[in-house]
Amino acid sequence: MASRRPVVMGRATVTVSPRRSTNGGTQNNMDVRYVNAFVGSIRNVFRTMLGIEVEFQRPVVKSSIESRADVSAVIGFSGDASGVVVLAFGLDVATGTASKFAGAQLTLGHPDFADALGELANMVAGGAKANFEGLDVSISLPSVITGQGHEVLNSKVHPSLMIPCQCSLGGFSVEVAMKVDKKSLVGAAS
Amino acid sequence: MKIMLVDDSRTIRNIQKNILGQLGHTEIVEAADGVEAMKTLESVEPDLMLLDWNMPNMDGLTLLKTLREKGRKFPIIMCTTEAEKSRVIAAIQAGASNYVVKPFSTETLAEKIAQTVKRAAAAPAPA
């Protein structure tokens, strides 16, 4: 089982905290059209690299991004849109996902465990931003956080949204906190 | 054929190696970023490079530009999550021979490699 003390693996800096609720507070105004870009990207990444179909539940809007998970893969956005995307897993689903992606059994202590999940997050973020038409957006290098029941907190000024996902490996969520600094139309994700 | 893989993700390099192995390519050289690649390229001349874009220390586009400025003409396929048209154009203008967007299937990577090798055999690589 993952340690209760959050550990960050990777190069970017993120803030983690023990589990606690972050509901309430800032009013959310994230453009829901961006959800399609992430849904399309998640579907494409899991289908192409893992051979797995993902089903999506209704996205949940939150006042700040939160991740109640054992393993989180985090990537930041900057440029015309800024924020963060988090792939949040329970340990079993994280292990199964990393192993399926790498084609080898990867457990929490394996040196490639964080690499595999970070690269998946990188693909999801890259695929989504390709559908942010008219926006020039850069993505950071990924970081992976482990720790039983941890939560990833982002700046409360960013609206955030959680997309619950279900696949044959189990359930996970993709959480997006994004602020668009430039008005633009968003293309529909395939 | 000697193929160099430059990607900061070992998982991706392993996936690429598996695909290349299926295609009969076993002479593989690896680097985890642009700086490491530059060092390796002091003593190695690959026949083909698969190059990631977003990497620490030196990114793929900088490495690509540096190599072309130095007159290294071997074919280079960008293999990256950067999928915007502007990024593809920037890479091609900098001297990329081909472009593969992650996520990629075995078939897509194999096709791009075959296409690039065929072009390189028919004409000099971009300067």
Image (tube, coloured by chain):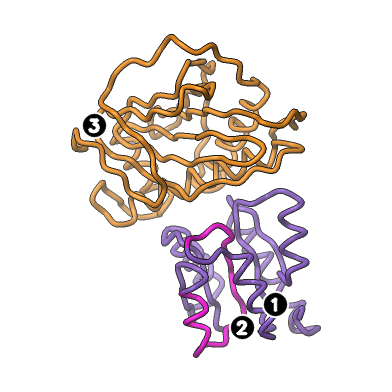
Image coordinates of residue B117 in percent, x first then y, are: 70, 77
Vertical placement of residue B87 versus A162, above or below: below
| Residue occupied by mark 2 | B47
Dot 1 falls on which chain? Answer: B
Residue at disc 1, secondary structure: helix
User: Three-letter amino acid code at disc 3?
Assistant: Gln
Assess whether mark 3 and mark 2 are in contact (beta carbons under 8 angstroms).
no
User: Three-letter amino acid code at disc 2?
Assistant: Asp
Q: Are marks 2 and 1 on the same chain?
A: yes
Where's the C terminus of chain A, which quadrant? top right
| Residue occupied by mark 1 | B117
Q: Are marks 3 and 1 on the same chain?
A: no
Residue drawn 75% across the image and 37% down it: A133
Residue drawn 71% across the image and 63% down it: B91
Image coordinates of residue A120 in percent, x first then y, are: 48, 46
- The hue of chain A in the figure is orange
Where's the N terminus of chain A, which quadrant? top left
Residue at disc 3, secondary structure: strand
Who comes first in sequence, dot 2 or dot 1? Answer: 2
Which of the chains is purple? Answer: B
Image coordinates of residue A160 in percent, x first then y, are: 51, 22
Image coordinates of residue B119 in percent, x first then y, are: 77, 77
| Residue occupied by mark 3 | A148
Magenta range is B36-56
